[in-house]
Image (spheres, rainbow, N blue to C red):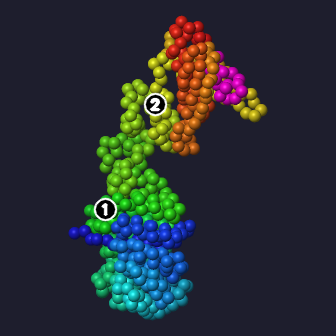
C-alpha cells in the first residue's frame, strides 16, 4: 500500500529568502490561497520575528486560508516562539516550527555552545512552543553535517519533549543522495521513539541535489518533504515541489508513495509565483519550464506524433500546461511540418509541400523558432500563381550615406519557353528598394506605377519574418504583390516580382511577348 507523503511548502518563508524575491503581505496571501488550491498539506507563511511585514503576512494567511496547516518559523528563543504564536492565533490548524543548529561548525562558530547546552535549549524550545500549539516541528539546523550519534540524541529528546515532526535539514546542500538516505534510515533504526513523530526533510540545492536527496529520504522512511514552488530559495534554492510530486507520481512503482497535490494546478501556481517574485523560470526547468513539453528534433517529433509515450513520460495536461509543443526549427522533420500546416488549414500536394518545406528549412537556419505566422507566410509566398513567369533568385544591395544605392538582381524564367534561364541586371535608385524596383523594371520590360508600398513584421521575435506589400498599376490594370523574408529588402523585391507576375498574367499574350527582354 502506498504511503501518504506530507507536502510542506516553504515558498513564502525560505523561498522568499531568494535575493530579489521579497513579497508584500497581500502577495503572500494570494500565493497561499493558490497553494491551498494546489493541495499542499502545510504552508509555512513566514518568520514572524524577522519583520513586522512577515508577522502581518502570517497573520493574514492564518485568517484567510483554510484547509492546510499554517506554520510559522521561530528560533529556539522565547521572543521568536511568542511572535510565531501571536501570528498564528487565528489559524484553525497551526504549527510552530522551531530550529536550532546542531553541527560542530555551527556550535563552535555561530552559537559557541557545547552539545549539552544545545540539547537543553532544544528541549526547552519544544516544550515552550507546546504551550501555544499542539503541533510543533523541530529542525536541528545543518543536520547533514551533525554527528549521527548526537543528532539521534537530539531527535529522541525533542520527541520526548513533544515534537510531532522532526525535520532533518541539509541546510547547505552538502549531502549526497546515498549518504542522505542512510542518514534517514539510521534515524528510523536508532531513535527509539521515532514512531511518535513524522520524519521530515528540507534539502538545499547547492550541489544540484536537493530533489534527489529528498527522494532518497522518502525512499528510506521520511514522511514529509519541505519544498518550494519552482525550487526558489536561499542561494541555489530549495527542493522543487513540482519535481518531487511528479517524481512520486510517475515513479509510483518505485517509491510507492502518494501526495494530496492536485497536479493540474502546478503550472498555474508556478506562473503565479514567478510573476509575483519576478524570478523567471528557466526554459529547461523540469515540469514547469517553457521547454518541458516542447520537442524540436525531427526524430522526437515523429515519435510523438506516432505515440506520445515514445518521448513523453507524463502528459502536459497532468500539470496544467495544456498540449505538448512541437517547436518547428532547423531540426524539425517533414512529418511535424506537414502536421502543423494541416492544423493551420493548408492541404498541399506533394510538390508544393516539398517546396514549402525547403523554404522552411532555409528560414529555420535564420530563426530559432518558426511560428504559425511564419508558416502561413511561407505557404502563401512560396506557392506561386499558375502564370508565374519570374522568380527572384538573388538580390544584392550596395548602399550607404556616401554611396549611390545600387541593386543587382537575378531572376529565373520560371514558366515560359525559356524556363530555367537566369537573367541578371543592375540599376541605381534613390534608395535600396527603389534600386531593386528599377532593376526589375529593366529586366521585365515593364515600368508600372508604384501606387503603394508597405513593410511590416508578421511574426514575433528579433529575427521576425517581414512582409512587404506593393500595389502596381500598368495601363488599366492594378495588382497587389507580396513577399516575405527576414530581410526586408529581399521581401520588398519578392513583393515586386510577385506583382510583376500578376501583371504579366493579365497582359494579352501578344503584348507580353513584346515586353520580354
Residue under the point 49% across and 33% down: 377
User: Which secondary structure dominates the residues rendered in magenta?
Assistant: helix
Farthest residue in the top direction?
510
Q: Position of residue 310 (x, y in %)?
A: 32, 48
Q: Residues within 10 Å of mark 2 (few under 14, many from 20)?
A: many
Task: Write the start and end of the magenta stretch as one range.
Answer: 427-444
Q: Is residue 490 left or right of residue 284?
A: right
For residue 366, which quarter of the picture?
top right
Which image quarter is the C terminus in? top right
Q: Is residue 429 above or below residue 317?
A: above
Secondary element at image label 1: helix
Q: Is residue 109 visible?
A: yes
Residue shown at the point (58%, 8%) measured from the top left: 514
Write the residue at 38% across / 26% down: 349
The picture places residue 364, in percent across and down from the top left corner, at 50, 38
Identify the residue shown where x is 48% and y is 75%. 57
Return the residue nearer the eye: 269 or 238.
269
Number of labelled discs?
Answer: 2
Question: Which quarter of the rendered picture does the N terminus lie within?
Answer: bottom left
Query: Which label belongs to residue 249?
Result: 1
Which of 404 and 44 lies nearest the eye of the viewer? Answer: 44
Of badges 1 and 2, nearer the viewer stands: 2
Q: Which residue is mark 2?
A: 379
Mark 2 residue element: helix
**Nearer the N terminus, badge 1 or badge 2?**
1
Instruction: Note whether 394 is above or below 293 in the view shown.
Output: above
Callout 1 crowding tier (Cα within 10 Å): few <14, some 14–19, many ≥20: some
Amino acid at each position: 500500500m502506498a504511503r501518504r507523503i506530507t507536502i510542506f511548502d516553504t515558498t513564502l518563508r525560505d523561498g522568499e529568502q531568494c535575493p530579489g524575491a521579497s513579497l508584500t503581505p497581500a502577495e503572500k496571501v494570494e500565493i497561499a490561497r493558490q497553494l491551498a488550491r494546489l493541495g499542499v498539506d502545510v504552508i509555512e507563511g513566514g518568520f514572524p520575528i524577522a519583520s513586522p511585514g512577515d508577522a502581518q503576512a502570517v497573520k493574514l494567511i492564518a485568517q484567510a486560508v483554510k484547509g492546510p496547516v499554517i506554520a510559522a518559523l521561530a528560533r529556539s528563543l522565547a521572543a521568536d516562539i511568542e511572535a510565531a504564536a501571536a501570528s498564528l492565533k487565528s489559524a484553525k490548524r497551526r504549527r510552530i516550527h522551531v530550529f536550532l543548529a546542531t553541527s560542530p561548525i555551527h556550535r563552535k562558530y555561530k552559537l559557541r555552545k557545547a552539545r549539552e547546552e544545545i540539547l537543553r535549549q532544544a528541549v526547552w524550545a519544544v516544550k515552550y512552543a507546546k504551550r501555544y500549539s499542539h503541533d510543533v516541528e523541530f529542525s536541528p539546523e545543518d543536520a547533514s553535517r551533525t554527528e549521527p550519534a548526537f543528532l539521534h540524541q537530539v531527535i529522541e529528546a525533542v520527541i520526548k519533549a513533544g515534537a510531532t515532526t522532526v525535520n532533518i535539514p541539509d541546510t547547505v546542500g552538502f549531502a549526497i543522495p546515498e549518504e542522505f538516505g542512510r542518514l534517514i534510515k539510521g534515524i528510523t533504526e536508532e531513535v527509539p521513539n521515532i514512531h511518535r513523530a513524522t520524519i521530515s526533510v528540507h534539502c538545499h540545492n547547492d550541489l544540484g541535489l536537493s530533489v534527489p536527496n529528498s527522494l532518497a529520504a522518502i525512499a528510506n522512511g521520511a514522511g514529509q518533504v519541505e519544498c518550494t514552488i519552482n525550487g526558489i530559495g536561499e542561494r541555489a534554492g530549495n527542493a522543487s515541489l513540482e519535481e518531487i510530486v511528479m517524481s512520486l507520481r510517475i515513479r509510483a512503482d518505485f517509491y510507492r508513495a502518494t501526495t494530496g497535490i492536485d497536479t493540474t494546478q502546478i503550472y498555474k501556481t508556478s506562473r503565479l509565483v514567478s510573476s509575483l517574485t519576478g524570478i523567471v523560470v528557466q526554459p529547461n526547468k523540469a515540469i514547469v519550464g517553457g521547454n518541458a513539453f516542447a520537442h524540436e528534433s525531427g526524430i522526437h517529433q515523429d515519435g510523438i506524433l506516432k505515440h506520445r509515450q515514445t518521448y513523453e513520460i507524463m502528459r502536459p495536461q497532468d500539470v496544467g500546461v495544456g498540449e505538448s509543443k512541437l517547436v518547428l526549427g532547423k531540426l524539425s522533420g517533414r512529418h511535424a511540418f506537414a502536421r502543423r500546416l494541416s492544423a493551420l488549414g493548408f492541404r498541399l500536394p506533394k510538390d508544393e509541400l516539398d517546396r514549402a518545406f525547403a523554404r522552411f528549412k532555409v528560414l529555420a537556419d535564420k530563426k530559432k523558432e518558426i511560428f504559425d505566422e511564419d508558416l502561413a507566410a511561407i505557404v502563401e509566398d512560396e506557392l506561386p500563381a499558375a502564370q508565374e513567369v519570374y522568380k527572384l533568385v538573388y538580390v544584392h544591395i550596395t548602399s550607404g550615406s556616401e554611396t549611390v544605392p545600387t541593386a543587382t538582381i537575378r531572376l529565373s524564367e520560371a514558366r515560359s519557353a525559356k524556363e530555367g534561364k537566369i537573367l541578371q541586371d543592375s540599376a541605381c535608385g534613390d534608395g535600396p528598394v527603389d534600386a531593386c524596383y528599377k532593376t526589375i523594371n529593366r529586366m521585365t520590360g515593364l515600368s508600372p506605377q508604384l501606387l503603394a508600398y508597405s513593410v511590416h513584421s508578421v511574426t514575433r521575435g528579433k529575427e521576425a519574418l517581414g512582409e512587404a506589400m506593393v500595389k502596381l498599376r500598368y495601363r488599366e490594370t492594378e495588382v497587389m504583390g507580396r513577399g516575405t523574408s527576414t530581410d526586408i529588402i529581399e521581401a520588398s523585391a519578392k513583393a515586386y516580382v510577385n506583382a510583376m507576375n500578376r501583371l504579366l498574367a493579365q497582359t494579352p499574350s501578344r503584348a507580353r511577348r513584346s515586353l520580354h527582354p
